[in-house]
Image: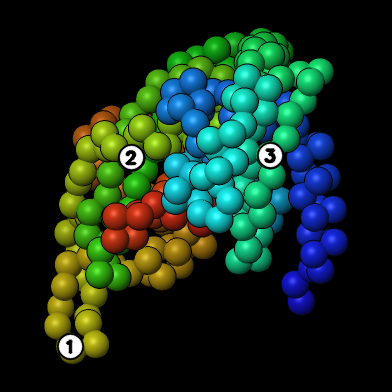
Amino acid sequence: MNDSFQEKRARHQHFIKKNGILLNAMAWEYYSESGRGVLCVRPAGPGQCAFTFENAQDVGGKAPQMAEEYDPESELVLAIFDEGVVSLYRFGSPELPPPAAYALHKLAELESEKQEGDSSATIEPIFNLFLYVNDGLINEVGIVRHELAGSVEAKIAFLQSQFISDLKRAKIYDVPRGYFTVTSKGEWKAGLTYEIFMSSVEGGNHLSVFRNALIALKASENPVCTITPVVDGVPRIEAVIEV
């Protein structure tokens, strides 16, 4: 059963209060790279969420007006996607505005990495991966390689922050040979459905569809990565898969 309006609003306010520094920091980072927009939060599994910074027109509703009127140096516009409904919030933090929150968040990351020892200081390749779903089939994948030191959490956060720019410059590869799907008309087509891919996630074999791309970019056996489906040209943040 869906929560009532009051319950949902209370949950959102708790989320905002608990994650205020992170939200302000991400909003400033995205604004610095892309200009005005809306920080979007979507569920990504139990206890997880995924962040994107999107054009206000794409979010819809009152988002365009809010994005035009807010002051990026003291406020942010937040869209929370929850149970099929988009809730919009515009708020600020006088004690810790976005630029200061960003500086504090980066400092905290550096301190955390120092405490983790030498292992976190090792630079390793990490990857943003994209599944291109066209007409119901995945027959191509995309990949962008980065090199970064730090904790797994910091690396995942970095990959999420690069999602928009990486989508535009991802290198495209065909899925490996051996993936075929029988259509409703009995035709054989190269590729696999998104449902089949998600079933492979449960079995821990989901990186096999990226095999050609990962080999070409010299990935380790178990790289840190995020995977984003792009359905008929539109990215969908349904999950953040860590390996």
Lower position in the chain sequence, tag 2 or tag 3: 3
Q: Nearer the viewer, residue 119 or 98?
A: 98
| Residue situated furthest bottom in the rendering | 185
| Disc 2 secondary structure class | helix
- The amino acid type, in three-letter code, at marker 1 is Gly
- The amino acid type, in three-letter code, at marker 2 is Leu
Residue 38's spot in the image, x, y percent? 55, 40
| Residue at image coords 27%, 49% | 141
Examine the rendering and report whether any part of residue 128 can be seen: yes
Q: Nearer the viewer, residue 114 or 85?
A: 85
The Cα atoms of the two marked residues, 3 and 1, are separated by 51 Å
- Judged by depth in the image, the label closer to the viewer, 2 or 3, is 3
| Residue at image coords 63%, 42% | 78
Lower position in the chain sequence, tag 1 or tag 2: 2
Residue 95's spot in the image, x, y percent? 81, 18
The Cα atoms of the two marked residues, 2 and 3, are separated by 27 Å
Colouring scheme, one of rainbow, by chain, secondary structure, one colour:
rainbow
- Judged by depth in the image, the label closer to the viewer, 3 or 1, is 3
Corner quadrant of residue 183: bottom left
Image: 116 above or below 56: above
Q: Are marks 3 and 1 in contact (CB under 8 Å)?
A: no
Image: 160 above or below 9: above
How many other residues sit within 10 Å of disc 1, few (<14), some (14-19) or many (≥20)? few
Horizontal side of 5 relative to 57 (left or right) equals right
Q: Which residue is mark 1?
A: 186
Lower position in the chain sequence, tag 3 or tag 1: 3
| Numbered badge on residue 90 | 3
Count how many numbered circles sit on residues in the image.
Answer: 3
Image: 49 above or below 147: below
Q: Which residue is mark 2?
A: 167
| Residue at image coords 81%, 37% | 17
The Cα atoms of the two marked residues, 1 and 2, are separated by 33 Å
